[in-house]
Amino acid sequence: MKRIALVEDNDDNRALISALLDDAYELYEYADGPSALEGMMTQRPDLVLLDISLPGMDGTEVLTRLRAHDDLRALPVVVLTAHAMRGDRERFLALGFDAYVSKPIIDEDELLQTIERLLGASP
């Protein structure tokens, strides 16, 4: 079973995403950037779902640290964000995220298809 790290500080968003993914993936949940980085060092995921607005360390800094780490730099990272103004998608992709999904998640198929595409196959 593929492993996904969900880095999201909002309990409701974590519960929703967990409900969508729990049956198909092994999910590791983190509420902040520092605990996510520490957890991913010991339980390496196959993909990361990463919020931008996090306590302690924002999602762009988490991405920077992932990309700087030899064992984690190739992980596909999906930005999950409420930043959905014109140009935000392009800005986040230019920072090195592999995909962009806006919150609130209205179209769960978009999230599922993005995950499947980045993992290279169905769960």
Image (spheres, helix red, strand yellow):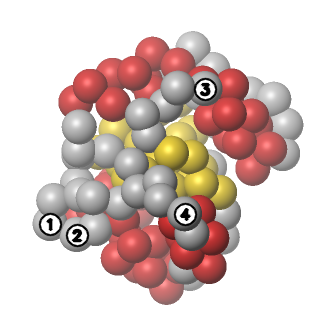
Residue designated by label 3: 107
What is the distance, in whole Å, between disc 2 and disc 3 at their CAs? 28 Å
- The percent coordinates of residue 18 (x first, y second) are 43, 23
Is disc 2 in contact with disc 1, using a CB cutoff of under 8 Å? Answer: yes
Residue designated by label 4: 86
Q: Residues within 10 Å of mark 2 (few under 14, many from 20)?
A: some
Q: Earlier in the sequence, mark 4 or mark 2?
A: 2
The outermost residue toward the right is 121
Q: Amino acid at mark 1?
A: Gly
Q: Amino acid at mark 4?
A: Arg
Q: Earlier in the sequence, mark 2 or mark 3?
A: 2
What is the distance, in whole Å, between disc 3 and disc 1 at their CAs? 29 Å
Q: Is residue 71 visible?
A: no
Point out which mark residue 57 bears.
2
Q: Earlier in the sequence, mark 3 or mark 1?
A: 1
Residue under the point 49% across and 31% down: 105
What is the distance, in whole Å, between disc 2 and disc 1 at their CAs? 4 Å
